[in-house]
Image (cartoon, rainbow, N blue to C red):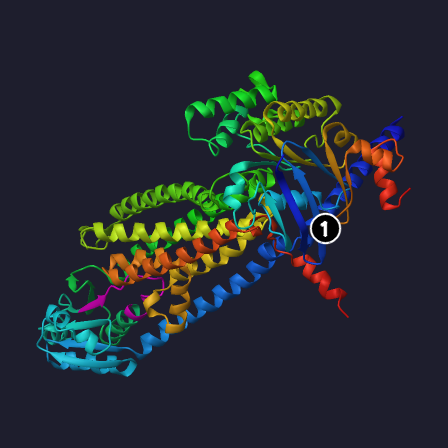
Amino acid sequence: MGLAVGAEALVKQFGNIRALDGLSFNMKEGEIFGLIGPNGAGKTTALRIISTLILPTSGSVEIFGLDPVSQAGEVRRIISYLPEEAGAYRNLSGWEYLEFMAKFNTKNSGELKVMIDEAAKISGLSDRLKDKAKTYSKGMKRRLLVARALMSRPKLAVLDEPASGLDVLHAHHVREIIKTYVKEYGVTVLLSSHNMLEVEYLCDRVALLHKGKIVVEGKPSELKSRYESENLEEVFAKVVGFA
Amino acid sequence: MKVKTWKKFSQRWLALLKGFGTILFKELKELIRDPKILLGMIIVPLVMFPVLGLVLGYAVETAQEQAQKATLLVVDNDGGNWSQALIGNLSVAINVAVVESITPQQVVDQELLGKYNSTQFIEIPFGFSQNMSRHTSGDLSVIAIVNVYGVFQGGSVFSDIGSAGVTSLVTSFNRIIAPNVLYTTQSSIIKGEIQEGVDPSTLSGLMISQSIAFPITIMIMLTYSMQIAATSVAMEKEEKTLETLLTVPVDRFSILMGKLSSTIIVAGIAAVTVMLGYNYMLGSITLGMPSSMSVDLVGLGLVPSAFGYLLLGISLFFTLLSGLALAVIMSAFAEDVRGATALVGYIYPLIFIPSMVLMYLDVNALPLALRAVLFAIPYSQPIIASKAVIMNDYATVVFGIIYVAAFTIVIMYIASRLFATEKILTAKLKFRRRGRNRKAEP
């Protein structure tokens, strides 16, 4: 399998704050890779650089051979980004929102219909898609947004805290969507989370971030046995010296 | 029982007041600590009104000075003793230049007013001295007439100071001689044509109604549409849809243009609507004449031509466009809709001050420095244009359009650069942080 994302010594400075401090990692095609760590570790900053939203202060990234700094337009064609705090247009119905977003990926009406039908299936919102987004619950909105992120079958889906703020049932539904979708269509997923259990369930490999750097990287099962821990939370605590 | 009820009642009110006080205190704290609100609501009005006062005071002073310095051209077609007496009386108060044996229209055609740097003249018609003599000899039914002609310059509140002065000088001469011997007729010189019987001050009064209505309409339209444009990006930020939109495969310039185009369409419709309303308003203003004759502004040529309306519409459109583009840029620096509307408020003095100044003043009567400042503010252009098109001064309007178009292009370029970089997400006005940093420095 080829290299999907390769980050090399990424640094991002916001004024006096160093959000990323030499972040390096590689992920393979078809993999679900998780960046995990506490709030402020630099997860969202890394995902925003990969999604072409912000530029690194130094270092480089490659996404399927493309540079998100100099080839941002090409990168946007093969990725899909779901921000942690995302919303839908309040006065558009779920269906209209999906149609609006799908039109950026295809102009072919046949493909457009397939894409929207796919999103409708993923979201599981059925008839509620006709209602305006402002009437949706938080869980419904997140399902709509996950469906939007996956409907175009991107080569790389960048999902920032995909089950953020959802209750147990909705979070479970979203995780199932991601897992099924990756299996069926071979989409590569880079996700971030501070929920270690979620990551353990979803990811093939994880990287633990602390103060803008990766402190340890590997398969969840490997990490647990290496640090003689019951779960990734314990691993993280041991690595950063809390335990 | 009564004591218990009263205790309960007072306790309830105390609890209510306590809750009210806590919320009020927190709200005030938030408002006062928001530098955008502090600046927009307190500092800007504190600066704006004194500036307006200074400009208007200066305008009155200038108009009075000009009236005192002006030369009054007297066309003496009588050549008698009484005309000499009147001219002598006028000379005491004002500089007088006398020409003889010439018709009022010839004065205009030969551009004598320009030669004597004057905007008005009086004609002492043939037979003036004879009539004065007959009246003073006891034939009270005979009266003498002096014709006052004033150039109509587009109108502003203080433009009548000069003409009112001349009329009062003639009236005071009348009082010296006999109570009811001397009468004046008023005529206007509009675009090189004498309009007999049209009083320039009455005309100015009528034109002021439009010179106030148009700037007020522009003020309302600009502020309202800029508020809407400012929320277009801020709303995306507040609703958390902007990040997603910026990662879809579409050129960032398309996003900006899409957002601006919707406001451009609204601006275009607004410009046409204003033109229609303005045309209707000017058409419906009629000038009541003393001789019960009614002359309307259309008849006097004091409404813009079709070409004038077109230029005025273009000027308005570009001004709106530049205002909207600037509002979009400013909203990019805000985190939410409230912040965006507060930020756009900083532009309002640039709309209000020239609008209010131009309501009262004729831009051409101002000193060069003040005129340059007014011309440099893009939002004053439609108001300047609205007066210029009436006087067929198309060059001023075209120059204004070119200037605003160039300003708009610069603003659009800045907006597109802002959209192309991460600044659209990260740019913020950080008054507070800077203040803290300064404090922290030794």
* Residue A194 against residue A57 in the figure, above or below: above
Residue A220 point in image, percent of width and height: 79, 33
- Give the quarter of the image for residue B106: bottom left
Q: Is residue B48 magenta?
A: no
User: Magenta segment, which residues?
Assistant: B147-163
Q: Is residue B11 visible?
A: no
Please say if B240 is above or below A102. Answer: below
Task: Tell me if I can see residue A7 in this picture.
Answer: yes
Spot the residue most to the front.
A1
Is B301 on the left-hand or right-hand side of B407?
Answer: left
Residue located at (45% from left, 68% from top): B55
State the residue lying farthest toward the right. Answer: A243
Q: Position of residue B41 (x, y in %)?
A: 59, 54
Residue B384 as seen in the image, left or right of residue B117: right
Callout 1 secondary element: helix
Amino acid bearing label 1: Lys
Which residue is nearer to you in this view: A19 or B335? Answer: A19
* Relative image position of residue B305 (x, y in whole percent): 21, 52
| Residue hosting label 1 | B29
Q: Is residue B160 magenta?
A: yes
Viewer-closest of B291 and A52: A52
